[in-house]
Structures are given as C-alpha cells and as structure tokens.
Image (cartoon, rainbow, N blue to C red):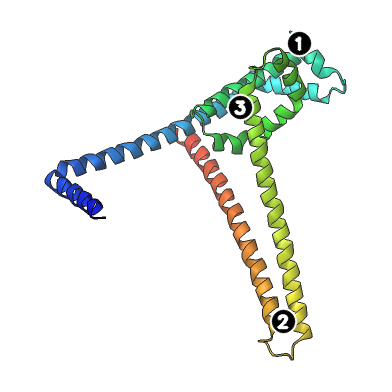
Amino acid sequence: MEDSDTSLTNLVSALIEHPTAIVGMFALLIAALGIIAQRRTSKEKNSLDFQANYLENQKVQDAWGHLRAFKDNKDPDKHNKLATEKGTDERKAAILLLNEWERAANAIHHGLFDSNFLYQAHSSTVIGLYKDLLPFIEIIQSTNPRYFVGFTKLAVRWQHKRALEFRKGIELKESLMNLNRTFFNFNQYLESHSNCCPKSYNFNRQLKEFEHSRNNFKRKHRKLYFSFIQRRWISIKDRLFKTNP
C-alpha cells in the first residue's frame, strides 16, 4: 500500500515539475478522439456513397427486374439451371447483385462501411436475396467454397439480428398483455372489495403484481424506444448529408 502511495506521489510530483507532459497527454487524448470521430465519419460517408451508387446504378435496377422474374418462375430445377446455364440474363443478374453485396460485406468486415447504417437501410434486401439465391449459392460454393463467403456471413449475421429484434417485439407484446390482465384483475378486486380495508394482504399483493407488470413493460418499451431513436437518428443524418454534401 505504501509503495502504491509513493508511486502515485512520485507521478504527481513529476507532472508538476514537467507541466508539458500534462499538455502532451491532453493533446494525445484529443488526437485519439479526433481519429475515432474521423473514422466514424468516414465510415458513414462511405456507406452513404455506396447506397447512392447502389440505388442509382441502372444495371443493379435491371438485375432486380430479372431476379424478380426468376423468383416467379415455378420451375423446381431453376437453381440448377441458373448455376449451369451461363450467359443468361438471370445468371448475370444474380452474379451482379451477389458481387455488389460481397464487396459491401468485405468493406463492413474491414471497418470501411457502417454496418448499423446499412443494416437499417438494406437488411431486408440482403436477407431476401440470400433466401432467394441460397440453393444457387450452395451449388456455386460446392465447386469453390470461397465464392460469396462474405455475403453469406453478412446475411446470416443480419438474419440473427433481425430474429433478436423480432423476439423483443414479441416480448413487448406479451408484457403489454400481462399488464392489461393484471390491471383488469386489480380493478375486479377493487370492485369486489370496495368495503374492505385497503391495507389488506390481498390488496397489497394485487398492487405489487400490477406495479411489477407495469415496470416490466416500461423497461422493455424503453429498450425498443431507444432502438427506434437510433434508427431515426441514422435516417436524419442520411437526409442531412444528402441535403448538405
């Protein structure tokens, strides 16, 4: 303990004798925070640029048209044909879209794109593309397992994240149902015991059940509300960036 106090005293004395060290430490801290903020801004800008190019790319839009036609095709062997018949519009469309999101997945993996931003904007697109082309991807990967690995990992990760969000929504709905049921029971008890002493054991038990359900609902609603605020903030930053590039 004494050694620790002595070391701290020596450190304070050294800083007092060399005030430039304090300035240097603050400068280093500010520089580190600046680098972190710059990287964050760069990731957001890269993500916005990718989204703008993706949405304005006519080849991408045409590819989605071909993919919708492929999805409506009722041929049970369509994925095998897509993998073996090279040069068709459907195959070119599938490869183009998968390559677009393979590059995006690699950029996210290396910290160049903002994963949360792209998830909020394109998670349904990526998950839907993965589900529609999964048999085709598996056939392609059977000859070369490295094909579309980044896209596959991204789609699975986003599917898992979507499932967790869906579960939170179900939990919130169940909590609201419990709250309504407890409130109904509480009212029933008050009506049937209107002449009873309000400090009875049963009254207190009903009150505690109601308060517990209410607090549980508030806690889950707060988590969902903060998640909504985060998504709205990302959307607002997106619009501001486009308005004031």
Where residue 232 sits in the image (x, y, percent)? 56, 46
The image shows residue 10, relative to residue 74, as above or below, that is below
Mark closer to the observer (1, 3): 1
Q: Which residue is mark 3?
A: 55
Q: CA distance from mark 2 to mark 1?
A: 74 Å
Quick one: label 1 or label 3, which is nearer the N terminus? 3
Residue 45, how many percent across, how many down?
47, 31
The residue beneath circle 1 is 88
Tag 2 and tag 1, C-beta contact below 8 Å: no
Q: CA distance from mark 1 to mark 3?
A: 23 Å
Residue 6 position (above or below residue 140): below
Q: Which residue is mark 2?
A: 202
Q: Dividing the image into 4 quarters, which one contains the N terminus? A: bottom left
Question: Can you tell which quarter of the image residue 80 is in?
Answer: top right
What amino acid type is highlighted by mark number 1? Answer: Thr
Between disc 2 and disc 1, the foreground one is 2
Instruction: Please tell me whether mark 2 or mark 3 is closer to you in this view.
Output: 2
Vertical comparison of 49 with 180: above or below: above
Q: Secondary structure at mark 2?
A: helix
Instruction: Work out whether mark 2 precedes mark 1 in sequence or the reverse, and give the earlier one.
Output: 1
Which SS class for mark 3? helix
In front of the other: 64 or 174: 174
Q: Which residue is drawn at the image coordinates 49% and 29% (left, top)?
A: 111
At x 61%, y 22%, the residue is 102
Label 1 environment density (alpha carbons within 10 Å; few <14, some 14–19, many ≥20)? few
Quadrant showing the C terminus: top left
For this view, does 235 lie left or right of residue 19? right
- Furthest residue to the right? 75
Which amino acid does the dot numbered 2 rest on? Asn
User: What residue type is disc 3 on?
Assistant: Leu
In the image, residue 137 lies at what x, y percent? 72, 20
